[in-house]
Amino acid sequence: MSEYILEMRDVVFDYPGGIRALNGISMAIEKGKKIAVLGPNGSGKSTLFLHFNGILRPKSGKVFYRGQQIKYHRDYLVNLRKNVGIVFQDPDIQLFAGSVFQEVSFGPMNLGFSIPEVEKRVVEALKACGIEELKHRPTHFLSFGQKKRVSIADVLAMDPEVLVLDEPAAYLDPKHEQKLVELLEELCRKGKQVILSTHDVELAYAWADYVFVLKAGRLAAEGTPQEVFQNETLVKEADLRKPQLLEICDILKQKGFVFNKMPRNIPEFREELLIYVES
Ligand SMILES: Nc1ncnc2c1ncn2[C@@H]1O[C@H](COP(=O)(O)OP(=O)(O)O)[C@@H](O)[C@H]1O
Ligand SMILES: [Mg+2]
C-alpha cells in the first residue's frame, strides 16, 4: 500500500488550441498531511486539481490514487469521485440546483442514501459551513462568498476521503476565512485529507504541513512552509512573497532573538515570545 494518497508522474496537459497548462508535473502527496498548492494566476493550480479526480486526463504522464493508476472509464471515475471531492474555484460552475437545500442534497441523494440520511448530511454540511440560514434560499441570488461556502457544503455532504479545495478562501471576508480555517482543521482532525490551492502566502504558511509551488505549469518548489518561505532565492524565483510573520521574525532575529521553532501563527509566536521573556 502506498503512503501517498495522490501522485503525479510527468503530467503534461494542453488545453484546446495547444495551450500548455501543465508542463511535466511530478508530485507525491503524503497521506495525512495538510497540503497547500501555491502559485500565481495561470500557474496551473486549477488544471492540476482537475486531474485529481479524473475530470481532466493528462496528455502524457500518469496520475495515481492510493498507489493505483487512475483509469478513465465510467465505473472507475464514479468510484474515484466518491473518494476525492473537488470544490471548484468558481462556484458558478459547480452550483446548478435551484435552492441551497436541493444543491447540497444532490450528491448524497445520488449516492443512494435514504431521505433521513440525506437530510442529516445536508444539515450537518450547512452547519459546518455556517450557512444553515441559507437552506431555502435560491442559490443564484447568493453573494460570491456565500456561493463559495455552499459549494464547500456540497462536497462535505458527500463525505469524501479527500477534499480538494480550489482557492477556498477567495472572496471570503476575514470572519468567514477564519471559520474556513477552523473547519479545515476539524476535517483534518477527523482524518480527512485536505488539499487546497491559494495564492495567499499567509494562509499557506499558517495552515499547511507541506506546500507545493507552481510556476508556469511546472513545480517550482516543494517543502514544509518553513523550508519554502525561509529560502529567499526560492521565494523570489517562484514569484512568492514572505509571510509577514516571518518578516517580523527576521527583524527580531537580527536583534538577537533566538527562536526554538519558527512560529507559523500568532499563538505559536506568542509561545516563543514567552519562552524568550521568561528565560
Ligand atoms: N478552459 C481553458 N481553455 C484554455 N486555456 C485554459 C483553460 N483554463 C485554463 N487555461 C490556461 O491554462 C493555464 C493554467 O490555468 P489554471 O490552471 O486556471 O491556473 P491557476 O488555477 O493557477 O490560475 C493558463 O495559461 C490558463 O490561461
Ligand atoms: Mg485557478
Image (spheres, rainbow, N blue to C red):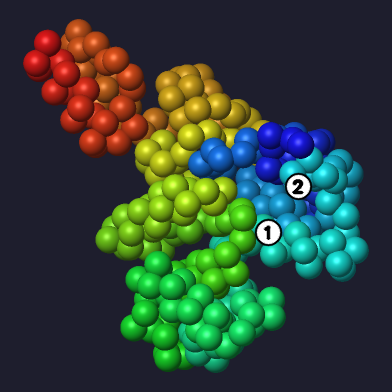
* Residue 149 seen in the figure: yes
> Residue furthest toward the top?
256
Q: Nearer the viewer, residue 200 or 183?
A: 183
Q: State yes or no: Cβ of the residue under disc 1 lies below 8 Å from any atom of ligand 2.
A: no
Q: Which residue is mark 2?
A: 65
Q: Quadrant of the N terminus?
A: top right
Q: Amino acid at mark 2?
A: Tyr
- The residues bearing labels 1 and 2 have C-alpha atoms spaced at a distance of 10 Å
250 relative to 255 in the view: left or right: right
Q: Which residue is mark 1?
A: 83
- Indicate the secondary structure of the residue bearing disc 2: strand
> Residue furthest toward the left?
278
Q: State yes or no: Cβ of the residue under disc 2 lies below 8 Å from any atom of ligand 1.
A: no
Of the numbered discs 1 and 2, the one sitting upstream in the chain is 2
Q: Amino acid at mark 1?
A: Asn
**What percent of the width, then of the height, locates residue 196?**
54, 50
Q: Nearer the viewer, residue 77 or 99?
A: 77
Q: Is the residue 44 above or below the residue 242 in the image?
A: below
- Residue occupying the point 69% across, 37% down: 4
- Residue occupying the point 64% across, 80% down: 113
Q: Are marks 1 and 2 in contact (CB under 8 Å)?
A: yes
Q: Is the residue 248 above or below the residue 67 in the image?
A: above
Q: Residues within 10 Å of mark 1 (few under 14, many from 20)?
A: some
**What percent of the width, then of the height, locates residue 160?**
61, 61
**What percent of the width, then of the height, locates residue 164?**
59, 55
* Residue 46 seen in the figure: no
